[in-house]
Image: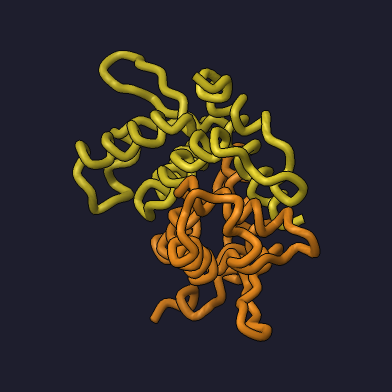
Chain colours: A yellow, B orange
Amino acid sequence: MPEILSLTPVDAVACCPPMATTPLTEESAAVLAPMLKALGDPARLRLLSLVASHEGGEACVCDLNDAFDLSQPTISHHLKVLHGAGLLTREKRGVWVYYRVDSDALAALGGLIAGAGR
Amino acid sequence: MPEILSLTPVDAVACCPPMATTPLTEESAAVLAPMLKALGDPARLRLLSLVASHEGGEACVCDLNDAFDLSQPTISHHLKVLHGAGLLTREKRGVWVYYRVDSDALAALGGLIAGAGR
């Protein structure tokens, strides 16, 4: 198995030299593309921004229900996709799961994209 | 028509306050998600990085053929998707179309993603 596939998403992003100087390897692209694909949906993008800007930097489905014309199971599904992609962390407290943005992953991913234009 | 939809992708990205302080509007998310979706494919991500790191910062399909186990029409298709999403600019010279990364769009998009973690 290529080493990069055994890394966490943050490590995988942080591993890579700037795209403007060195082309991404096939292995790096295979790790990074699913993170970007997870963000490439308007509802998930808004959910991520809602979690990011929510009081205390965390939110559960219960906090997000009113902001969307989406059902609670649909919101839960999108949050799971963002978590699965390594963009949100989660913690169960009581009956709810609370989500937080993974700042390191977003900073690294954002830096990689911005760096492609340099 | 919402004003944001009449903006170019760069303006649309630059318009938006940091996601960590203000949730994205539905209109902004609708403009930004297709840019991220375009990047959410391993082949397109590698193509973007190949264009970004190519000599002179530009490349045509003729320059990229050897780097991929993909046909020229498939590479052309992916380049068109990246151009349609506002991530590559294009210029026809002779028989070839040359692509360049749109540095402003990538810088703004990358900054927006990185900013969600702050």
Q: Residue at x 41, y 63 (%)?
A: B30
Say if B108 sits above or below A100 in the image: below
> In this view, which residue lies farthest toward the front?
B66
Q: Nearer the viewer, residue B22 or A70?
A: A70
Say if B1 sits above or below A15 in the image: below
Q: Residue at x 54, y 22 (%)?
A: A2
Residue B85 appearing in the image: no
Q: Nearer the viewer, residue A3 or A64?
A: A3
Q: Residue at x 57, y 24 (%)?
A: A4
Q: Is residue B118 left or right of residue A46?
A: right
Q: Is residue B88 left or right of residue A83?
A: right
Q: Residue at x 54, y 28 (%)?
A: A9
Q: In x, y percent, where is residue A62?
A: 29, 33
Q: In x, y percent, where is residue A110?
A: 63, 44
Q: Nearer the viewer, residue A35 or B68?
A: B68
Q: In x, y percent, where is residue A116?
A: 69, 52
Classify residue A42 by image quadrant.
bottom left
Q: Quadrant of the C terminus of chain A?
A: bottom right
All told, the count of numbered labels is 0
Residue B90 appearing in the image: yes
Q: In x, y percent, where is residue A102?
A: 54, 30
Classify residue A92 by image quadrant.
top left
Say if B21 sits above or below B72 in the image: above
Classify residue B107 by image quadrant.
bottom right
> In this view, which residue lies farthest toward the bottom?
B94
Q: Is residue B40 left or right of residue B97?
A: left
> In this view, which residue lies farthest toward the top?
A94
